Amino acid sequence: MTAFDSSRRRFLTDGGTAVVATWAATSLPGLREALAHARRVATQPTPPPFEFFTSIQGADIAAMTAQIWPADDTPGAREAGVVHFIDHALASDPVALPMRPLFTTGVEQLHAKVSELYPGTDARFAGLAGERQLAVLRAIESTPFFDGVRTMTMLALFANPSYGANPSGQNWAAIGFEPRFVWRPPFGAYDRDAHAGEGQ
Amino acid sequence: MSIPDFVIVGSGAAGGVLAKELAESGFRIVVLEQGPYLKNSEFEHDELKYAFRFGITNDPRIQPMTYRRTEAEEAKPGGTIQYAKLVGGGSVHFTANFWRFHEIDFIERSTLGAIAGASLEDWPFTYAELEPYYTKAEWDLGVSGLAGTNPFDPPRSKPYPLPPMPVKSSGVLFERAARQLGWHPFPAPLAILSRPYMGRNACQHCGFCIGMGCEHNAKSSTLAAVIPRAEATGRCEIRPYSTAFRIETNRRGRVTGVLYYDRSGRERRQKANAVIVSCNGAETPRLLLLSESSRFPNGLANSSGLVGRNLMFNGWTLAQGEMPEPLNEFKSVMTTRVIQDFYLSDPARGCYGGGGLDARFDAYPILFALNNVPPGMPRWGPDFKRWMRSAYTRAIMIEGHSTSLPVERNSISLDPVVKDAWGLPAMRITNTDHPDDLKMREFLVARSFEVLQAMGAARPWALPVTIQDGSNHLLGTARMGDDPRRSVVDRFHRAHDVANLFICDGSSLVTGGRGQPTCTIQALAYRAADHIARFARAGEIPSGS
């Protein structure tokens, strides 16, 4: 067994992650199209309208992804167009139909949580101040919906650029992963002096 | 081809070796493999493909499984048995750890006595008898390592054919910390070429071993190392996309051939003088059980009732921490240093069991983000992103690999309700790890924390030890033995009940060793091939055709 195998196993069984993982396993064309769509959208000055979500739902989920993977000196999930990845998949991929309830009921649960925590305001999640958004997400971070959005975000960020995501591997670069695939020692800071006599 | 001498079902760690050995011995072979026949140039560095999209593994959407903890429960869809489904089988996608079993693994029952709740048995032969075949496997396949560096290593007749892989930062840190703790770290033996060997390339350190095939042919899978030699004899046909579902028998109780579905789903028959089953420790018992008949009402070769029983998964543990400087563990092989100081069972631990630890890193970016976040660290937000940007290059994992006691009630059987895409009964897993196996894993987790602390690793954490509902180590389900009432195959892998049926793969193992079974499965395959060839030449395998 390995950490790789153990993580794979968890996709098969964990609520929202399993729903997303099943789709990602089943629909290569849908995955590619949705990632390519997100990438196109990310390069446009004005994002196009949502195809599946209402503009209100889309804004909420976009705000959620921006909280999950915020911009710093590297792009965040909003800049990567992650919400359009989710939206396009749900709108146009028949294989993604079983994923729809996870997101449509989830986004309403998100709004219900906003109303519960901040009664008397009409605000949607996207309109809340940052601190309030964080409080709402902390309150729903164990739900299948949150897991689903988070898993879709990680797929869109870290999948191979060949799928249409992660342009030039920019999100890999942000975490220090270099897609060179041919290396010579030394590999890291702790094996710099360890290779004398290895004859490589 | 007229009727071949042998049909081998499965082309993996064992089947690939058997095909090459028997073809080189002059026999005519057909190998049925349910997966595709891929070239090394078709393997990609693609986490999404191999981790999410079942790129080269069994696909639960068409091959569902069910799981239950005990025989008293109704099994429910679930269970996480995983195996590689392509020519070369698990040897293509494994980490390539290549530990020999030790002398004790073959004689633990007589050494320790009976263990309550377990069906521990001695093997029908000793380490000494298998040793030449361990050496043959290492030299024929290509293994990197350094003999004489592990004081617990069993006797070996030859050193490794290739020097060890260059040490990684995780190996340097682990070596230093382990020595500080009084342990004996040594270079990991790996079925990966540190130098060019037998016409194959050396490892280029791409870092994508686990779960994936090697595009340089540097991983010593049977696909890279021996299947080309089997085909070069002109006597071995590898037939991909061939899903065996029944071994046929005649009224004399001999096998006559194998029924399988081809790529288009059409039923086909391949006749054979003899059949060798090498499907892995989960699919082998399933195929035998699917091959029931009026003469073999409990499944083929199952007069003992032990087909599918004594399922062993091996124990596995994960602990993780982070170092101040980048290790860049995404480069090169998964692990370069190992200890086996806790290999022997020790009553002072309060349980049966033994195991080893290695230092490694085996998570690609998506998996790491989803599943390797320390408890207490936010799984999203600015702190999470900061953590990812630091930890992906600074994380180090300590993994434990340990014993599974054979327990008869742990099994592979046929699900009475759920069917696969061909309408055949799905695989049903019944498993509750023996309490001692869980205690041994807790012991290894505690040692993993010690070594992380000795390294000065920050944020140490470990996965909780839980009962397993699957694995990719699939062992013990058609165990070897001299007594037909207590084993499925004899010491030469011949089914006690069927004179022209042989079974050789993880299912043959009587005990599971300490977590890295592939080397032993392959040594057994080399040994089985020698004996099967000897029997065939002597006319001691009655033909079923």
Image (cartoon, coloured by chain):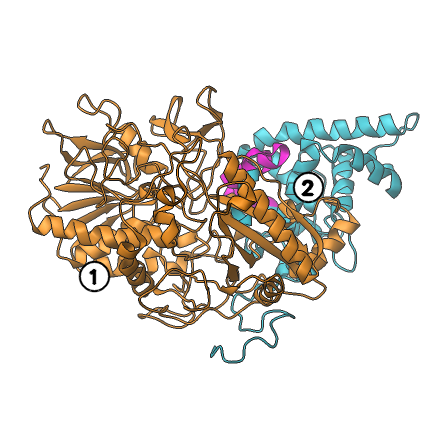
Q: Position of residue A5 (x, y in %)?
A: 51, 46
- As drawn, the residue found furthest toward the left would be B539
* Snapshot quadrant of residue B504: top left
Q: Is residue A129 magenta?
A: no
Q: Amino acid at mark 1?
A: Ala
State the predominant SS element of the stretch in magenta.
helix
What segment is highlighted magenta in the picture?
Answer: A11-34
Taking the image as shown, residue A174 lies to the left or right of residue B135, namely right
Mark sitting on residue B533: none
| Colour orange belongs to chain | B
Q: Are marks 1 and 2 in contact (CB under 8 Å)?
A: no
Q: Which residue is mark 2?
A: A150
**Badge 2: residue crowd in 10 Å (few <14, some 14–19, many ≥20):** many
Q: Position of residue B254 (x, y in %)?
A: 13, 33
**Which chain does tag 2 point to?**
A
Residue B48 in sight:
no
Hue of chain A?
Answer: cyan
In this view, the residue in front, B273 or B100, is B100
Residue at point 64%, 27% (across, down): A101
Image height check: is A136 above or below B148? above
In this view, the residue in front, A62 or B409, is B409
Taking the image as shown, residue B448 lies to the left or right of residue B490, namely right
Give the alpha-carbon distance from disc 1 to disc 2, as whole Å: 50 Å
Q: Secondary structure at mark 2?
A: helix
Q: Secondary structure at mark 1?
A: helix
**Which chain does tag 1 point to?**
B
Taking the image as shown, residue B134 lies to the left or right of residue A188, namely left
* Snapshot quadrant of residue A120: top right
Q: Which residue is mark 1?
A: B232
In this view, the residue in front, B31 or B73, is B73
